[in-house]
Amino acid sequence: MEAVEAAPLRICMISPIHLPEPVTAARAERLRKLGGPDLDVDLVGLPSGAPRALDRPEDIEAATAHITAVAASLDPARYDVVVPDCVLDPGVEVGAGSEIPVLGLLRLIAAGLYGLGRPFSAVTRNETIAVELEARLRAYRLDENFRGTDVLNLEVEKVVHQGEWTDALGRVVRERAQAGVGIVLNGCSAVATGPSPWSGSWVVDPTTYAFDLIRARLHNGVRPAG
């Protein structure tokens, strides 16, 4: 009997901020490529009234409200899961009662890293994001091996123009490696880090790793359900 190939998991990712259309289109294309044949990924942007950056706690609150509203408007016949495109998991807990299951990038990633039993750290664009990321890790009780966050202090434009981000990240990774921390979570899902050029260290690309974890579940017959 021939094996029946499972249908791709249909994922709707939702941006946490309002982005220019060309940026959204480029991000959507990368997500589709990362999804491959197993994950059918769409990206939905937020309206012009949404935050343009997550620089203040109020921005995170507004992003959560916008993401929750977008998730509630989606057709449950079109998507299997919703994933906010942000390592802060905005809207994940609020969306727990949603008709479409809501998965969090950080929860997936941190659970995977927790299982490795090795120390890891994170880098974020600013202090606001660092504080929220660490609070999330504590709330998930996945911070046992967490060794803190390095803040890059970069403007949101550096997410698109990534040279300065990559340089700053490289310095952090080298310093962390010298302190015995060989896993660094790149705390922005929109920055594509690719394979680590820093020997002996693993720079965790949030979307790539989360998709790998989802894909592994699928290959073992388990479809995520929130």
Image (spheres, rainbow, N blue to C red):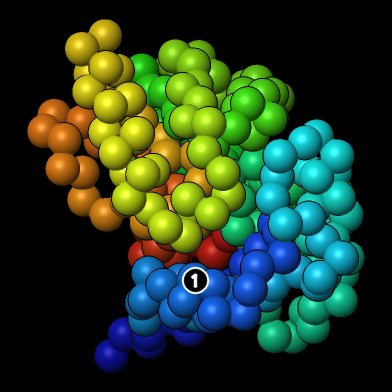
For residue 11, what is the image quadrant? bottom right
Secondary element at tag 1:
helix
Q: Position of residue 148 (x, y in %)?
A: 49, 16
Q: Quadrant of the C terminus?
A: bottom right
For residue 69, what is the image quadrant? bottom right
Neighbour tally class for label 1: few under 14, some 14-19, many 20 plus, Cα within 10 Å = some
Give the residue drawn at x 80%, y 34%: 57
Q: As displayed, is residue 90 above or below residue 9?
A: above
Q: Position of residue 191 (x, y in %)?
A: 43, 53
Q: 51 or 102, which lies in front?
A: 51
- Looking at the image, the residue that sits furthest to the bottom is 2
Q: 22 or 185, which lies in front?
A: 22
Give the residue drawn at x 81%, y 72%: 47
Q: As displayed, is residue 122 above or below residue 203?
A: above
Q: Can residue 148 be spotted in the picture?
A: yes
Q: Position of residue 93 (x, y in %)?
A: 79, 44
- Looking at the image, the residue that sits furthest to the top is 179
Give the residue drawn at x 36%, y 81%: 37
Query: In screen coordinates, is 218 left or right of 196?
Result: right
Q: Amino acid at mark 1?
A: Arg
Give the residue at mark 1. Answer: 27
- Looking at the image, the residue that sits furthest to the left is 199
